[in-house]
Amino acid sequence: MKARKSAHLLGIGLDNEDGHKRLTRAEKFSIVGGSEETHERMTETLVKTFENLKDKGKDLEETDREELAELIKRNTPR
């Protein structure tokens, strides 16, 4: 029996200057730190990315790196 591959994305914000500790956790991603703006942008990006994967009928585990990178790039707020 083959073991199921598991995947989880981790976003780390490094621009926190206000002293707040921010943590957002979901089933397949976690976001730690960052300013309020950065943390919100990372969260929005990953929520949209996982919505796109769901629309395609795919799980994170079966998505190749190139496709994931393209989805993240496309979903990052400008």
Image (cartoon, grey):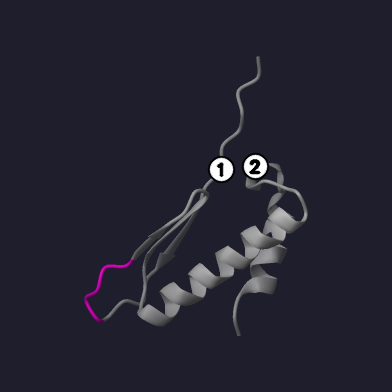
Tell me, yes or no, whether the two marked residues, 1 and 2, touch with CB atoms within 8 Å: yes
Q: Which residue is mark 2?
A: 61
Q: Residue at x 76, y 49 (%)?
A: 57
Image: 52 above or below 40: above
Q: Nearer the viewer, residue 47 or 65?
A: 47
Left or right of 17? Residue 69 is right
* Residue count near mark 1 (Cα–Cα under 10 Å), binned few <14, some 14–19, many ≥20: few
Residue at the left extreme of this rendering: 19
In x, y percent, where is residue 50? 63, 58
Indicate the amino acid at tag 2. Glu
* Residue count near mark 2 (Cα–Cα under 10 Å), binned few <14, some 14–19, many ≥20: few
Indicate the amino acid at tag 1. Ala
Q: Which residue is mark 1?
A: 7
In x, y percent, where is residue 38? 44, 77
Ranked by sequence position, the earlier of labels 1 and 2 is 1
Residue at the top extreme of this rendering: 1
Image: 63 above or below 49: above
* Residue range (magenta): 18-22
Q: Nearer the viewer, residue 62 or 15?
A: 62
